[in-house]
Amino acid sequence: MRGTVGYTANMTPKTKIRLARNLRHNQTEAEQHLWQHVRSRRLSGYKFRRQVPIGTYIVDFVCEDAKLIIELDGGQHDDNKQADDIRTKNLEDFGYHVIRFWNNAVLENMDGVLMVLLQALERTRG
């Protein structure tokens, strides 16, 4: 199911919402780990949502106030760099800044991930 999230262009809005809901209930280990640190405004008061439809995509995490999207990448993304670059560009065209982290960075270096996120969030305040 995860491989389909980049191919939602032909889905109805209701179908996208159902898919996003399904993804929220079936998070990867890395998504679960990051969610525990950013949910309920735990990261400097910023509100994050997870598995949110934006354009033709469903993004992993978004902070609407900061226009910041967080994408977590597993091993399959190593082979799909061009598709990820197109996805990032399209999301940036909607006015978002996209930050990508490898799953292993989230699982093994959460402090570093949170530091990068806080820096990105602070840049949006200025």
Image (cartoon, grey):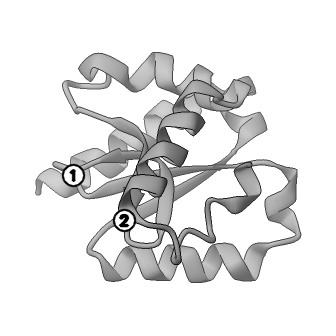
Q: Residue at x 51, y 76 (%)?
A: 9
- As shown in the figure, which amino acid type bears the numbered disc 2? His
Seen from the viewer's position, the closer of residues 14 and 65 is 14
Q: Is residue 25 left or right of residue 125?
A: right
**Label drawn at residue 97:** 2
Seen from the viewer's position, the closer of residues 4 and 100 is 4
Q: Which of the 4 image quarters holds residue 103?
A: top right
Spatial separation of the CA atoms under disc 2 and disc 1: 9 Å
Badge 1: few (under 14), some or many (20 or more) residues near its Cα, within 10 Å? some
Above or below for 98 versus 9 = above
Q: Position of residue 50 (x, y in %)?
A: 43, 38
Above or below for 45 versus 76 = above
Residue reaching furthest to the left? 126
Seen from the viewer's position, the closer of residues 54 and 32 is 54
Q: Position of residue 102 (x, y in %)?
A: 72, 47
- As shown in the figure, which amino acid type bears the numbered disc 1? Ala
Q: Residue at x 70, y 79 (%)?
A: 83
Seen from the viewer's position, the closer of residues 95 and 7 is 7
Question: Are the residues tagged 2 and 1 within 8 Å (C-beta)?
Answer: yes
Q: Position of residue 126 (x, y in %)?
A: 11, 57
Q: Position of residue 110 (x, y in %)?
A: 60, 25
Q: Is residue 7 left or right of residue 90?
A: right
Above or below for 110 versus 49 = above
Q: Residue at x 34, y 37 (%)?
A: 49
Q: Residue at x 74, y 25 (%)?
A: 108
- Secondary structure state at the residue bearing disc 2: strand
- Name the residue that disc number 1 marks: 66
